[in-house]
Image (cartoon, helix red, strand yellow):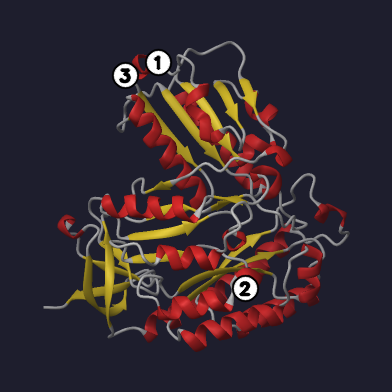
Amino acid sequence: MIDTQVFQDKKAVYYTLGCKLNFSETSTIGRALSELGIRTARKGEKADVCVVNTCSVTEVADKKCRQAIHRLVKQHPGAFVVVTGCYAQLKPETVAQIEGVDVVLGAEQKGDLLHYLGNLQKKENSQAFTSEFKDIRSFAPSCSRGDRTRFFLKVQDGCDYFCSYCTIPFARGRSRNGSIASLVEQARQAAAEGGKEIVLTGVNIGDFGKTTGETFFDLVKALDEVEGIERYRISSIEPNLLADEVLDFVAQSKRFMPHFHIPLQSGCDEVLKLMRRRYDTALFASKVQRIKQLMPHAFIGVDVIVGTRGETPEYFEQARNFIQSLDVTQVHVFSYSERPGTQALKIDYVVSPDEKHRRSQQLLDISDAKTQAFYRRHIGQVMPVLLERSKPGTPMHGFTPNYIRVEVPRNDALDNQLVMLRLGELNDDGTALMGEFID
């Protein structure tokens, strides 16, 4: 039994690194602490509790996690420090040794964070609570808005794919999911709280249904019936799991937006085999082509990793040419990072840091050109934009159904409002179109 009196008038700070799923889970943790009586610390206030939700997708991410913990310990002396997330699961002993850390929680324990707070009294030695990845079984629900207009609905967790370069299955456990009934109820609650847009998040969301015998297509159809939600967006989904029936449904749905994010990782079949991916470039190209046939104005973002072990100059040229040929909107480029314990370390050919940087820049240039061309094709059109509040002194922004970022002068009364805007020219830094209100 938790003694809530201990937590009254206490203050907490939260720091999240990594993916949208992490941000959603941190927001859920924050809501749970708020219900105990712990409020979020205001700027300049010293916190009683620090929660750090970590990422471990790259070596740089690990370093950022350690830096964030050190910084929070220094900024909030005496605070009870909880570290969770992927880095905590993979390197619990390393995290536990960081000065000021009190509790380290793995993936299986994250959902029960409240039970590890004790009376918030710091102890001489930190404690780490983790489970072997094969024993990570629980699914912790999360549907949270945090500081954003959009809600993020966690529909799935974990991954069974074990790609050669990736540690996520070891950090997140096996694929598992909530039931469609429970997720529909969370979407209804989001609508009741004023939410208009929900992003479906997870680690491998196309694999939805492993624990409930349902399918991702079943989930999409059920969520489409929830009244009050104007927009759904599907976050990153594997190309081999993006079923044609889902694409056909999204194409005629009023609520699911023409916006897709599909990890490619490499545009070279030989490298895809080394990565142990479950598709080839022909399948990927066919998915992009089908999306564009059904939804010509769809936004398609892709993830690409450059400089993986085994990516020779010839293989990179194949990948670059393939990516150039795709009718996609944006390329998210990541430099390969060695991950301890992964099978990729057995591959002999190593790409130098300078060459990784050169290759990354080439793909980023391709991405910029594709995004700008996509934006320019929409100048002059009138489209609905869901506006989001902005920081003082900055324009408001929002997104069209097909994820074009649009800026308008700040007006807090328009926060979370769908408005019709005429899309004007690109802003000064080329990151958005200027919106004009329709009388």
Which label number is shown at residue 153?
none
Q: Nearer the viewer, mark 1 or mark 2?
A: 1
Q: Quadrant of residue 418?
A: bottom left
- Extreme residue toward the bottom, this view: 293
Q: Residues within 10 Å of mark 3 (few under 14, many from 20)?
A: some
Judged from the image, the secondary structure of the residue bearing numbered disc 1 is loop
> Where does residue 368 sit, x and y in percent of width and height?
50, 74
Mark 2 or mark 1, which is nearer the start of the sequence? 1
Instruction: Give the vertical position of 419 relative to 411 (above or below).
Output: below
Residue drawn at x 66%, y 43% is 171
Judged by depth in the image, the label closer to the viewer, 3 or 1, is 1
| Image depth: mark 3 or mark 2 in front | 3
First of labels 3, 1 by sequence position = 1
| Residue 297 place in picture, x, y as percent | 42, 83
**Disc 3 target residue:** 8
- Tag 2: residue type? Gln
The image shows residue 331, relative to residue 214, as above or below, that is below
Q: Going by the image, does 13 lie left or right of 406?
A: right
Q: Quadrant of residue 263?
A: bottom right
Residue situated in front as seen by the camera: 141 or 40: 141
Residue 379, compared with residue 140, is above or below; it is below
Q: Position of residue 114 (x, y in %)?
A: 47, 26
Which amino acid type corresponds to the residue marked 3 in the rendered image?
Answer: Gln
Badge number at residue 362: 2
Residue at mark 3 to residue at mark 1: CA–CA distance: 10 Å
Name the residue type under label 1: Asp
Q: From the image, tell me which residue sits under label 1.
A: 3
Q: Secondary structure at mark 2?
A: helix
Query: Tag 3, which secondary structure?
Result: loop
